[in-house]
Amino acid sequence: MRIDVITIFPGYLAPLREALLGRAIGAGLVDLAVHDLRSWTRDVHQAVDDSPYGGGPGMVMRPQVWGEALDAVLALDERPARIVVPTPAGRPFTQATAQAWTGEERLVFACGRYEGIDQRVVDDARRRDLPVDEVSIGDYVLVGGEVAVLVMVEAVVRLLPGVLGNPASAQQDSFSDGLLEGPAYTRPEVWRGLAVPEVLRSGNHAKIARWRRDRALERTAQRRPDLLAALPEDALDDADRAF
Ligand SMILES: COc1ccc2nc(C(=O)O)sc2c1
């Protein structure tokens, strides 16, 4: 997978070259290119924004600069790309989104700042039949799209074959089966007077699996009843329902 990020703060994306993601890049599982939007400005001030039509606070990012930047970055590679625009007004980015994007050959992230990018940039891309997703990582507002890109790239890349040491980890994630993960424990057996639940030390794998499933159901019911309600009919077996 090739990932391009266009931003006025390239340094914000430096964490993508650390740790797991850095190793995925080093292993050739991901190609990452970060581009400074100001490279496509033509004025001495390298202006990327302007006042909003209709008035109101803040500034809007100029369509000319973004149009030229996207055209140039898209032309760098012939692989078909999905353009992703992080925005508080976007559809929710979920684990399902991350899973779906693992099928993309290329993702091009357009990081907005200020009050966002002139809408015509997205409209122009869509009318050229380029796939464009406007997405939000949560019901809060960041200062720009860069942090959202860090979140989304990590969520997607970790799912790519060969990235996680143990692929089973991705299967047992929170959300992968629609439930939150239950509690996890490691040595020592007792810490500050708190003992590891005995069932986890029993060696009885069936009991352990049941206990873990019950804790996941319990935690999901307490913290995210919406996820429980959204589960498909056949997601819960009789033992789950008995819980
Ligand atoms: C102007 O660019 C922004 C500003 C806030 C923001 N907040 C996001 C979120 O997903 O919460 S994406 C995003 C992009």
Image: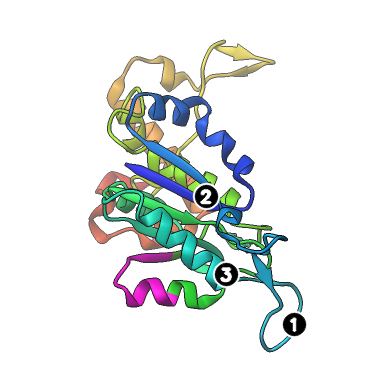
Residue 241 seen in the current view = no
Left or right of 55, for residue 236: left
Tell me if label 2 and label 3 are in contact, CB under 8 Å.
no
Residue 41 seen in the current view = yes
Residue 124, image x, y percentages:
41, 76
Q: Is residue 95 above or below residue 172?
A: below
Query: Which badge, 2 or 3, comes first in the chain's sequence?
Result: 3
Q: Is residue 15 above or below residue 8?
A: above
Residue 28, image x, y percentages:
33, 28
- In the current view of this chain or complex, which residue is farthest to the left? 234
Ligand 1 location (quadrant) = bottom right
Disc 2 residue type? Val
**Label 3 within 8 A of ligand 1 by Cβ:** yes
Residue beneath disc 1: 56
Residue beneath disc 2: 149
Query: Could you tell me which secondary element the residue under label 1 belongs to?
Result: loop
Query: Could you tell me which secondary element the residue under label 3 belongs to?
Result: loop
Residue 25, image x, y percentages:
40, 30
Q: Residue at x 34, y 14 (%)?
A: 203
Q: Residue at x 68, y 64 (%)?
A: 47
Compute the Cα span from label 3 to label 1: 15 Å
